[in-house]
Image (tube, rainbow, N blue to C red):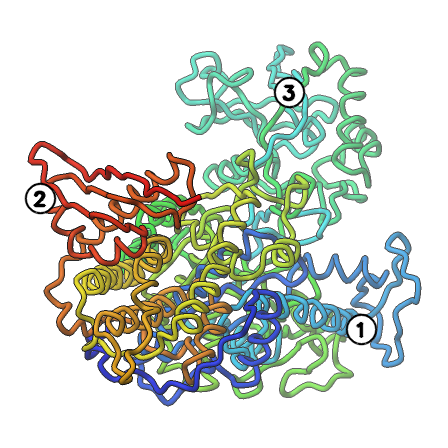
Amino acid sequence: MTETQPTPAPETTPAPQRSVVVPEKPALEGLESTWAERWKADDTYAFDRTQPRENVYAIDTPPPTVSGSLHVGHVFSYTHTDLIARFWRMRGKSVFYPMGWDDNGLPTERRVQNYFGVRCDPSLPYDPDFTPPAKPDPKKQIPISRPNFVALCEQLVEQDEQVFEQLWRRLGLSVDWKQHYTTIGPKAQAVGQRAFLRNLARGEAYLQEAPTLWDVTFQTAVAQAELEAREYPGAYHRVAYHRPDGQKVYVETTRPELIASAVALIAHPDDERYQPLFGTTVTSPVFGVEIPVLAHPAAEMDKGAGIAMCCTFGDLTDVTWWRELQLPVRTLIGRDGRFSRETPEWLSGEAAAAAYEDLKGKTAHSAREAMVAMLRSHGDLDGEPKPTQRMANFYEKGDKPLEIVATRQWYVTNGGRDAGLRDELIAAGDSITWVPGHMKHRYDNWVGGLNGDWLISRQRFFGIPFPVWYRLDAQGEPDYAEPLLPTEAQLPIDPSTDAPEGFTEDQRGKPGGFIGDPDVMDTWATSSLTPHIAGGWSTDDDLFARVFPMDLCTNAHDIIRTWLFSRVVRAKLENGTVPWHHAMISGFILDPDRKKMSKSKGNVVVPTEILDKFGADAVRWRAAMARPGLDSPFDETQMKVGRRLAMKVLNASKFVLGNVGATQLNAFEVAQPVDCALLARLKDVITKATEAFEAYDYTTALETTEKFFWEFCDDYLELVKERAYMPPAEDGTVDSSSASAKATLAIALHTQLRLLAPFLPYVTEEVWSWWQEGSIHHAAWPCELDLGSAAAADPTALDAVAAALSGIRGAKSNAKVKMRAPLARAELIGPEKLVRDAESAAEDLRRTGNIVGDLVFTVDADATELRVDAELAAVEE
């Protein structure tokens, strides 16, 4: 599919004009509140769902996490989306531009806990009369039921959503707010649960007990896409394992506390030091547990002692060894991050059990200290621990290293274990147009590096629950192999409060009865369905057919691996297609030291502060200067340039419409050479800006338009204002040269306002309202101009006129006189084309330069540029 529109007919019939009313003192202050309210009242940005798919431009808008806070990076990236939306709306498309709120997730739960001073205890019954404490204490949180906790989550995120919406409206996002959605509301629940049931029916979703990355703080499983490798302080411990002949085999480990769970020592098969040991056994220090010595190519010969202990599980390498060498599972650390309080069966020997008593119930840190003390006392610690910085996996929102525990979790296939599916997903990336193109490499690298399927279950409370129950046998044990499922017509359901068909609520948790799946879907498992949620998949088939696959997704490059990829997975599995045709990727907004902005670093710029100081149009201008995919350092002073541009639009428009009275759009009156040249150049600007926007290069579209606008103001307006001011003759006839100037000014302003409208929606709407009916944001994008007699004009003629004007000004500036000071004589000298082009504007140059004597044009065949020799006129005392 392509969004390219048929070339519209030239604008010979402009939109209806209203009587011109220009404020005496136009100002930027107040425009945002005025027009934001007007747009809301008039439903200016409503999506017209009667349009067929070919007339629709649909956007998959990133739903911001409402439990967080917005910073200037968000403002910039969401502005980029809006620029594209406004352009295609002016191109005649019906723009489907919803806004979603990502309101579930761990951050929301943590925020609710601290805000209300509560914690969720699923064992408690619902209290319909519960009221949060008037003075919440985050350190003494009150336990409440899951339904009560979820109700508080919904209450708080609704407040946060209102704050976010106010900011987006003020920024001027042209969102259709009637299309807004949340990632946890009933609509999202039904879509998420339906998609899961279909994944399950097709064999794409499955329940499995396996080693799982686990965050002990948030008490939940963590997916590969949420990992963050960070340096973490640790120490190498040189520890002795014992051979049957009494000799010692030393390993170096940063996690001696896991010795109790060791299942093997592993070295590289080519390592001559350990080849004699392969196939033999050693015993662990302190505990005396017999374990094998094995070979595996993943062992690093040049790291530490070259032989490693494998525990289940210390890190992801241990998981690989466990799986490929078929080692036993000896898990000690539980979901709470503490060592098991029960003595495991492999430590049942008297000495081993006695030693384990010192580790029971301890955290990993405390157990490490206890283990080092035991190693030292047994003589199995060679030397003292050597401090080091080790790389550890963290949950991206966590502050403690992840543990690996064996848990039962839900997974969705994503190519991590299926080479065929992986190839299909990489091919899906090929069918997307990436802006900029090199961002596709990040997608390919992520998909190619997957090492497992997508873990989608989370041990939380505020999220979309899995629509699953399990039958309990006579002993009260759940049957995980045959889950009980609802029909799609019953969705959405909550298995913690709803009973499955054939059961009653009083059978919950009893032998022969049932239990509900306690987990919820990961927030990415929900937001991976944003095209489906917003587009009405399975709930509004007519809408879905008009918007899916969508035209555009936009997000920052750091979530290509999460949000972007997960949407491709879900659309591929459910619809057999990609979810959109274009992916426009934003860069980061950096602080002046080129560091990424983050709350933890204290370098975040609060959006309301810069909006208060400079205004939305100025902020949007600066955002548009950040090209797709490129990081951009933030400098507040740059906003001043955008504000100056917005103010210039007001003042130049007041001059054209009010002072000069140039309001009639009649191209047939444009006859003077310099006027024709201006419109010819404007036609080129339209072409370049349009092509840039169609290529999603909004920055070039702005630069092209803005450059012309400043030339128009600084040169053309100054050049022709005297001619435009010429009064009618006594008989009422208007001089043709004056009519030409006025028509050119009106056409140029009318066109430039539309070119600037996506970037400066407030000031352009304000000026448009002075003399045009309707909203500028529904006006046609200026794809073509009817130049009349100007069609054959040379746009480069303006360069010579601008150079001549600059030379005249320079002569006066060098003489330190005012710009209105008269010149007795002026000679323009240069190559023939420049001289003749300047000569075509002779009368304008004479009037503008106040040349009271001779104005001479001299060709110099050896010259390469135009210069001006000027002589000041004598001034009477």
Answer with left or right where residue 560 lies relative to residue 466: left
First in sequence: mark 3 vs mark 2: 3
Label 2: which secondary element: helix
Neighbour tally class for label 1: few under 14, some 14-19, many 20 plus, Cα within 10 Å = many
Neighbour tally class for label 2: few under 14, some 14-19, many 20 plus, Cα within 10 Å = some
Residue to which mark 2 is pinned: 832
Q: Distance between the residues labelled 2 and 1?
A: 84 Å
| Residue type indicated by callout 3 | Thr
Q: How far apart are marks 3 and 1 (CA)?
A: 46 Å
Neighbour tally class for label 3: few under 14, some 14-19, many 20 plus, Cα within 10 Å = few
Report the mark closest to the observer, 3 or 2: 2
Residue to which mark 3 is pinned: 388
Answer with left or right where residue 199 lies relative to residue 593: left
First in sequence: mark 3 vs mark 1: 1
- Residue in the image at 71% along x and 47% along y: 216
Q: Residue 679's x, y, as percent?
A: 23, 65
Label 1: which secondary element: helix
Question: In this picture, is 235 found above or below 734?
Answer: above
Q: Nearer the viewer, residue 599 or 498?
A: 599
Q: Nearer the viewer, residue 115 or 28?
A: 28
Residue to which mark 1 is pinned: 148
